[in-house]
Image (cartoon, helix red, strand yellow):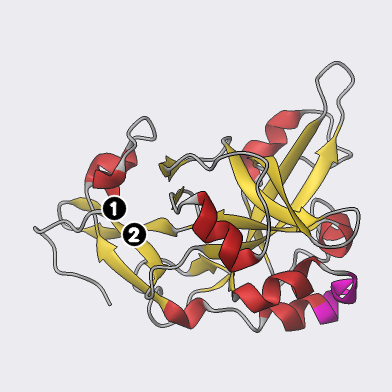
Amino acid sequence: MCGRFAFFSPTEAVAGLFGVEFPFELRPRYNIAPGSVIVTLRAGSRGAPEPALLKWGLVPSWAKDAAIGNRLINARVETAHQKPSFRTAFKRRRCVILADGFYEWRAMANGKMPYFIARGDGRPMAMAGLWEHWAGASDEPLETCTILTTAANELIAPLHARMPIVLAPSAVGRWLGPDADTAPVAQAVLRDADNDRLAYRPVSRAVNDPRHDGPALIEPDPAVGDGE
């Protein structure tokens, strides 16, 4: 799964990598938790990727209560096209969540140790996701999203059984575009993921508290050996 991530690359670098223009400045964030408003890309009116701010935790259009989003921060790619909560979004409302890395925890004798997982080349990443529009009876309309996950590869498996799907920059347009309108085609795009280009390192347990933020959270913890 993915329950916490960071996004701190400069606006210009992200815009150049994904070929988009941001109507707002990207604020560095090192400890993004579920329920936060996050930076995403989704298909615009002309089909090209456009930035959008979405709340993390998908609320299906049919939900009676927005609180369901607290439980829908991730969706399994193997079943998302079938599940009532995700299947319409899988077909029509795909997005990518922009990040520089995500956190996972490994159980150790002295408690769980957090690790920061990022691309080995240091570039920002695009995590495949789904988004929805919800309008409750008395609440303001919400646009929300979830992160798609897959089985962990050999690198991440010692930390957790699941991991986000990290798309290559060249695959972002295909994932968002109309050619990915059916589950088989969309899943074929996801098989082009860049998940094998990741590396990880142990970091401070300060990240366990979502109130903590700042670049110190992603610095290697010298008390634990580095990951690869």
Could you classify mark 2 by the number of other residues whose Cα lies within 10 Å: few (under 14), some (14-19), or many (20 or more)?
many
Query: In percent of the image, x 29 and y 45: which residue is there?
Result: 215
Are discs 1 and 2 less than 8 Å apart at CB? yes
Residue 203 relative to residue 157: left or right: left
Q: Nearer the viewer, residue 85 or 174?
A: 174
Residue type, mark 1 in image: Ile
**Magenta span: helix, strand or loop, mainly?**
helix
Task: Report which residue position mark 1 lands on.
Answer: 218
Q: Which is nearer the eye, 148 or 67?
A: 148
Q: Label 2 amino acid?
A: Phe
Residue 183 belongs to magenta span: yes
Of tags 1 and 2, which is closer to the observer?
1
Is 132 magenta? The answer is: no
Q: Is residue 58 visible?
A: no
Question: Vertical placement of 70 versus 145: above or below?
Answer: above
Please determine whether, in this image, residue 85 is positioned above or below residue 163.
Answer: above
**Residue 76 place in picture, x, y as percent:** 66, 64
**Local SS, label 1:** helix
Work out whether residue 80 can be spotted.
Answer: yes
Residue 174's x, y, as percent? 77, 75
Secondary structure of residue under mark 2? strand
Residue in the image at 84% along x and 54% along y: 44
10 Å crowding of disc 1: few (<14), some (14-19), many (20+): many
Residue 116 circle label:
2
Magenta-highlighted residues: 178-185
Residue 49's quadrant in the figure? bottom right
- Residue at image position (43%, 57%) is 102
Q: How many angstroms separate mark 1 from mark 2 (CA)? A: 6 Å
